Image (cartoon, helix red, strand yellow):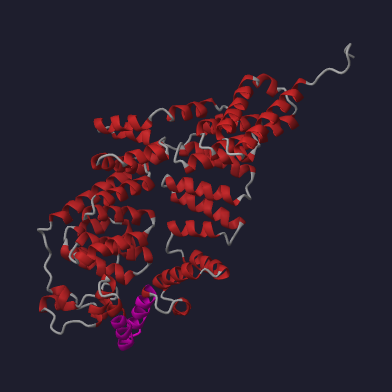
Amino acid sequence: MPLFGKKKDKSSGIMKNYEKVIKEGFEAASRGDEDKAILGFRKVLRWVTEDIDKVSKLSEEDKAKLSELLTDAGEEMIKLKQYDSAIKLLEKAKTINPKNFRAWMAIGKDLLQRNTQVPYALVCLREASKLEPENVEVHLLLGDAYRIQGQHDKALAAYQRALKVDPENEDALQKVLKIQPENVDILERYIKVLEGKGESEELVKAYNKIVTITGAPEYLERGLELDPENKDLLINKARLLLKEDKIEEAKKIVSALKDKYPDDPDISMLYDELNPKETPMEEEKEELKPIEVTELFGDIGIGESEFGSIEPEHSDEKIYEGEKEASELKEQGEEAQEAVEEEKVTEEEESKVEEGMEEFNVESMSQISISPYDMFLHAFEEKNLDDAGEILKGMRDEDIEKIMSESKDAIKFAKSVALNIGRLDLAIKFAGKLVELEDTEENKLELSSLLIESGAVDDAEKLLNEIVKKNMKNGKALYLKARIMSVKGNDMGARNFLMMATKFNPELKEEAKSDKYFEKYRDKDWFVKITS
């Protein structure tokens, strides 16, 4: 026994110091004294780094406790937007206790939300999902990370795991529908959830979507009970009546809609279909002989004679320029997908993380914070897509916002870079800014194409309707509307819009033959005829 009594436990003294400073940091934050809170949490981070040998000798119980304290501090630093320090605190937390679910989860969630180091975010989220496989949020975040990288199959698998744990999870159902808008089973489950919550506005949208896909009259009636004057539901009702040869009832609905919405292009087309001109041109009559007029224009709503009287406008240079740009976008998208595959985190990197080797990740975080905006502008000046791509991968929201304030050329370059690395979300953001700066058909067409690719077909359709309203002969706009109809499962609409698109712009026939959105139609007689 020591001369002056029991030997003092140094480890307990360390723990008390950590607990005291972290507690003071939270108290300062609650008072609104953010500077003092930040200083306190940084002090703890420094102490843990300096005391690493002592920390390693703590009991397992104390290690677990310290790991939780550092996680608390790291999460609070995220709220205070001190991201570098936050990640370092959380890295320490999971190194001290590799089974700390919250630390792995917090790192992955923060990096993902800031679009920073997504591959490493995936590593952390996968580890978190192993520790708590029944946690719905971690599966949703995993799905989001995969979707950002363009790995939709893996994203769907993650969302389905969330639904296995919580079959009525609204977020999971919505996320699946973003990737698979035609998934009737998921859509029906989503409708049941909305019906249980009584959310009328969202319910009406869901009813309309499932009616568009399936034509199920029971959903149509449910929707009209909630909103009897809903334009989209009434358009769908008119189309269903048209299929049932109830022409007069359909005319009555469409005439009322025409009076109420005289400038709506979809209603105008449907109205023209129901009120066709009497004398179609013989040439057009012969071409459309195998298909009935009422069937052919079920969604586009242009009379047979009116359609036949319009000649393709080869002089519309913007259409061809837009076509060329779309082709380039497609090539960039394919290259971007390859880049995504190459960017996957290797098993070796995962094993390093699992062994607690945090240096690589913390170091890279500190590198990211060094003026990525200036480095990106330099890459823009050099027109170096590869370097710009590496820089953009690690950019934070504030840096991206700075790019949004640059010239149109810089934003266009950033959009191309985003596509090149498979960041469709950023490409859409930059394309949207270009529309805001210059409201042209070309910019709207490009944004619409990207929105369709992301699954946001409703947003794309609104933009395309604006174009068609002003210029019903814009072949590219009609072509993209055909894509939307295909996504929605409206085969008649896809055929109608595609026929009109290729009439106004014959060069689109070749693109349609290899277009993934029309793959299901390639053996159809009507598709072969349109693209021949």
Query: Can you give x and y, in whole percent of width and height, for residue 519 in the image?
Result: 32, 60
Query: Can you give x and y, in whole percent of width and height, for residue 187 in the image?
Result: 48, 66
Which residue is at a point 24% across and 43% down the rendered structure image? 408
Residue segment shown in magenta:
232-256
Query: Can you give x and y, in whole percent of width and height, for residue 45 in the image?
Result: 60, 26
In this picture, residue 349 sits left or right of residue 211:
right
Any magenta on residue 56? no
Q: Nearer the viewer, residue 84 or 305?
A: 84
Q: Visible in this render: residue 115? A: yes
Q: Please, is residue 83 above or below residue 48 in the view?
A: below
Query: Can you give x and y, in whole percent of width and height, for residue 331 in the image?
Result: 27, 46
In this picture, residue 85 sits left or right of residue 413:
right
Any magenta on residue 237? yes
Q: Please, which residue is most extreme toward the top here?
A: 3
In this picture, residue 395 sits left or right of residue 513:
right
Q: What is the number of callouts on the image? A: 0
Q: Quadrant of the N terminus?
A: top right
Q: Quadrant of the C terminus?
A: bottom left
Q: Nearer the viewer, residue 186 or 60?
A: 60
Q: Visible in this render: residue 530? A: no
Q: Please, is residue 81 above or below residue 227 in the view?
A: above
Which residue is at a point 27% across and 69% down the rendered structure image? 495
Q: Please, is residue 396 above or below residue 257 in the view?
A: above
Q: Nearer the viewer, residue 528 or 366?
A: 366
Which residue is at a point 16% across and 61% down the rendered structure image? 506
In this picture, residue 3 sits left or right of residue 462:
right
Residue 300 location, quadrant? bottom left
Q: Please, is residue 325 above or below residue 192 in the view?
A: above
Dominant secondary structure (helix, strand or loop) of the stretch shown in magenta: helix
